[in-house]
Amino acid sequence: MTLSFLSLLALAAAGASAFSIGRTANPASRSAALTGRDTSGLTPGCKNTPTSRKCWGQYDINTNYYDTIFHTGRTVEYWLNVEEIDCAPDGYKRKCMVANGTMPGPAITADWGDDVVVHVTNNIATNGTAIHFHGIRQLNNNQYDGTPGVTQCPIPPGESMTYKFHASQYGTSMWHSHFSVQYSMGLHGPLVINGPATADYDEDLGSVFMTDWGHETEFDIWATVATFNVTFDGALTGLVNGLNTGNCTDAPANERDPNCLNEGKKFELAFEAGKKYRLRIINIATEAWFQFSIDGHRMTVIAADLVPIVPYETDSVLVNMGQRYDIIVEANAAPDDYWLRSGFVSSCIPNGAPENITGIVRYNKDSTKTPTSVSTVVRQAFCLDESAASVVPWLPIDVTNMNGGISSENVTGEYQDKKFLRWSFNMAEGGFMWTNWSEPALGDVVSGNLGAIPKSDNVFPVGLSNPSTAAPSKNTSSELDWTILVLEELTPIPGISHPMHLHGHDFVVLASGIAKWDGTTDAWQFKNPLRRDTAVLPPNGHIVLGWPLDNPGIWALHCHIPWHSSQGFAATILESPSLITGSGATSDWTKDGAPQCEKWNKWYPTSPYKQDDSGI
Ligand SMILES: *[C@@H]1O[C@H](CO)[C@@H](O)[C@H](O)[C@H]1NC(C)=O
Ligand SMILES: *[C@@H]1O[C@H](CO)[C@@H](O)[C@H](O)[C@H]1NC(C)=O
Ligand SMILES: *[C@@H]1O[C@H](CO)[C@@H](O)[C@H](O)[C@H]1NC(C)=O
Ligand SMILES: *[C@@H]1O[C@H](CO)[C@@H](O)[C@H](O)[C@H]1NC(C)=O
Ligand SMILES: *[C@@H]1O[C@H](CO)[C@@H](O)[C@H](O)[C@H]1NC(C)=O
Ligand SMILES: *[C@@H]1O[C@H](CO)[C@@H](O)[C@H](O)[C@H]1NC(C)=O
Ligand SMILES: *[C@@H]1O[C@H](CO)[C@@H](O)[C@H](O)[C@H]1NC(C)=O
Ligand SMILES: *[C@@H]1O[C@H](CO)[C@@H](O)[C@H](O)[C@H]1NC(C)=O
Ligand SMILES: [Cu+2]
């Protein structure tokens, strides 16, 4: 059994129980795995059209986007003006935090290979902010990952920050605030990178955000969740693309809450019979599991997160927080009006109107009829993901010969002072995250003082840690050393799964299940395993995540339920710190990161509110 030197370092540092899968490097066989699938019929250099979606000029759906990083030479530029406003998405007026006055905010759209520049101005008087580009690899570009206390100080009120990144992958994602529970207040929007697709369609109808929603602000709810509640009792309702109807006007006029304005409205889509539509389904909820469907229609799923998959057909798709699915729906039903259902999964958490978080698909766009369609979808009883057997990456990566050590971590939940719930893993390092907004870990890396990274960052080191160690000699994602992390959910809280999200990488899911890991790798899938950036850790079960050590940086790994990440359910993955500064990942940090710290440190003492959660 060959134990990798790199993995030993990582394991020693993480202090976890571990062994190596002990496979020897065999680059030749790994590269062979990356041949892509059959695209015979694809003319080299062909155009992306409704009948040739696999094409993308000189690149195509078989291009290995991890190793082939190309530049169109085009830069797209966006300005986001972040503010706190009154909003009434379901007809009830409350405070929201949004960009440019809408929820979801403006779409950031680019082509595969473009550079993206986003100028963010914080006009919220009482909060800092930081914008994270969810799922974006940020290869050698750690300083623009937008994670407060990890890669930057928050942007204080009145100030701006310019984020820059390269669109090295394509598909559907979102930008969202990573400052405390701010994204749940409405600060999120689409991030669409155009590229090839694994099946043909006529029209792209854009993104469909699904969320839970209430009439109190999430910062106010956090005040309760923070100091006692294990988790949260569930929301009143939910929204589809920032819209829904509500029933607050049901009360007699003299008893009516003055914030109750009107009935709100439903999100609507217009279909033309015979056409195939692409939809980009996104779960941005605070705590809601969805099983999306459209009455009377089936769908073809073509991508999971930013990973194109072998198309499969289904009547519904399970979308957990932070996840995205690209689907194609054919307008082949009898022309009529149909419910588009978020499919709130009530077995995971309650909701005041679980069946009413809906939109409408109309074959006649002028129709105003309330649909009478019914759903034939069988709702799932557990809070799990789409089955790994269905979600097969189009570009296969065979990790049979990966060189990687395994760390095993227990996820637990504990009351501190009998009062505050803290989720933890990585106990050797403190267990839960509580960043210091004034001291982002990346700053300590830039100044060469790794020892200064606060212990409360819950650091989990992987990869090269010693500057004198030679850089990896191999360059492709399939040839590098990998890290493998087994997470075991051991909390006594039944039923709740945790959508785990890693910044800076797509990970592979070698195994997951509702039972404990048996301690062997026998049942793990090494040949083209599920690959994405967010996957659920099943309730009282386990998940095995692996990623290549090819992106030096400091990357958050966290539960995408904002209550839980605020309760510390997060770690700071410190990947090959000795290579971070030389990689270009910090070249702009002093220019763009440090000044935020200066300005933040000046403003924060005057802030009406202080940090009362993990910070992310
Ligand atoms: C957002 O608002 C700012 C300020 O009004 C404006 O300059 C900018 O173009 C807007 N951005 C988008 C994406 O609409
Ligand atoms: C952010 O602002 C909201 C409303 O102004 C406030 O309730 C909340 O406590 C603030 N949070 C932080 C961390 O500043
Ligand atoms: C938990 O939160 C609910 C509101 O969501 C509140 O009614 C209840 O009192 C809280 N429980 C405790 C123990 O604070
Ligand atoms: C209408 O409001 C009541 C409480 O006021 C709530 O229990 C119910 O779920 C709401 N129904 C819908 C469809 O929103
Ligand atoms: C939503 O709620 C109303 C009652 O408030 C009900 O009549 C309607 O059928 C519900 N269904 C959907 C799919 O929204
Ligand atoms: C995880 O918990 C089990 C007991 O359930 C224990 O045997 C094991 O040592 C723990 N692992 C770590 C890494 O703490
Ligand atoms: C956070 O970091 C700043 C700057 O290094 C330091 O002055 C402050 O004491 C730290 N706060 C805590 C709570 O450790
Ligand atoms: C890795 O890539 C760098 C530049 O991107 C190149 O200089 C180097 O030769 C490559 N190494 C190997 C082993 O291919
Ligand atoms: Cu969680």
Image (cartoon, helix red, strand yellow):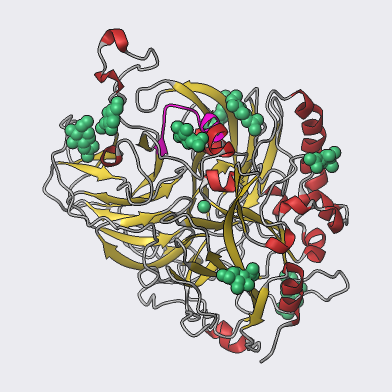
- Relative horizontal placement of residue 234, taking residue 294 as reference (left or right): right
Quadrant into which the N terminus falls: bottom right
- Relative horizontal placement of residue 332, taking residue 440 as reference (left or right): left
**Residue 354 screen position, x and y as percent:** 30, 41
Residue 556 vertical placement versus 358 (above, below):
below
**Residue 462 screen position, x and y as percent:** 71, 68
- Relative horizontal placement of residue 148, taking residue 579 as reference (left or right): left
**Residue 471 screen position, x and y as percent:** 79, 74
Q: Residue at x 29, y 58 (%)?
A: 380
Residue 511 vertical placement versus 360 (above, below):
below
Q: Is residue 484 visible?
A: no
Return the residue found at the far front: 418
Q: Quarter-wise, where is residue 319 in the image?
A: bottom left
Q: State which region is magenta.
A: 212-222
Residue 17 vertical placement versus 322 (above, below):
below
588 or 406: which is nearer to us?
406
137 or 277: which is nearer to us?
137
